[in-house]
Image (tube, helix red, strand yellow):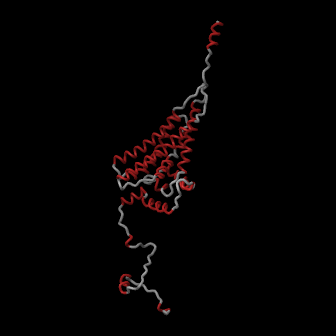
Amino acid sequence: MAAVGDLQFEEFGNAAATAAENPGATTISIEGPGESPAHQAGLPRGSGGEEDDELLGNDDSDKTELLAGQKKSSPFWTFEYYQTFFDVDTYQVFDRIKGSLLPIPGKNFVRLYIRSNPDLYGPFWICATLVFAIAISGNLSNFLIHLGEKTYHYVPEFRKVSIAATIIYAYAWLVPLALWGFLMWRNSKVMNIVSYSFLEIVCVYGYSLFIYIPTAVLWIIPQKAVRWILVMIALGVSGSVLAMTFWPAVREDNRRIALATIVTIVLLHTLLSVGCLAYFFDAPEMDHLPTATAAPNQTVAAAKAR
């Protein structure tokens, strides 16, 4: 049995030399938390790579995929599968709404707010609120414009709700689907393009529509100049969110294709804004009371009386 004095720690300057002298010895290398082994050191990265990671969020994407792989996925026909899309708290929703109202130049909306936990809760309720805001405000605008006219009879136009729902939800789902497919196709052509997931694109479009909720309420003001100023402000804010989000994903592509993609995104967004203003507010339908007309027999009787 070894004596107590024989059991002692020794510090060796060169582990390789020690192993060569004592082939049977066992060595353990203990490194500090801030140290990293030499074989794990990667190649130095240039400023261009760091800028791409800043705009596209490549590091966050890898972390998100790793965390997603650790999560236990459920079959798509179960309630638990869709419950994950609505697993978001109020703070996150408010933070994303604030980010859509105050876009930061040079910062990516997906990387800052969406990629860590993309959701459908915010986009769904923002679209639903916008549908009722447009429909109700359109009816009130029609009423206020013709208020005081003796021949005008107000009739609520409930069909505007269904029309607004079709327009808003079709835009919030079909346009992201087409854009996602296009980015996936270009990603197969140009390998250095980083594509967003479909859920992330839906989140961007959904939260970018929030600014139109207060804008639709203010569209009740019966002044065309005020309405067009409001739509230009809303279009500028929401359009800048879309442009700054998707430009980093296409800028490495062909220059013409990249510019055409951003222009198409902005034009479709402009068409939605101007179309809603023109259809629901600028051209209200009038429902006048029918004018009193004399019946044929009454006209003949009046002629005979003369």
| Frontmost residue, 291 versus 211 | 291
Q: Nearer the viewer, residue 30 or 48?
A: 30
On the image, which quarter does residue 83 sit in? bottom right
Q: Is residue 157 above or below residue 38?
A: above
The residue sitting at 59% across, 26% down in the picture is 288
Give me the residue at 48% from left, 62% from top. 69
Residue 181: image location, x then y, percent: 42, 49
In the rendered view of the protein, which quadrant contains the C terminus?
top right
Residue 166 image point, x, y percent: 52, 40
- Compared to residue 221, the image places residue 299 above or below, namely above
Q: Quadrant of residue 297?
A: top right
- Classify residue 154 by image quadrant: top right
Residue 66 percent coordinates (x, y): 47, 62
Horizontal placement of 252 versus 5: left or right? left
Residue 52, percent across and down? 39, 57
The total number of labels drawn is 0
Residue sitting farthest toward the right: 305
Task: Examine the rendered structure and indicate whether residue 215 appears above or below residue 26.
Answer: above
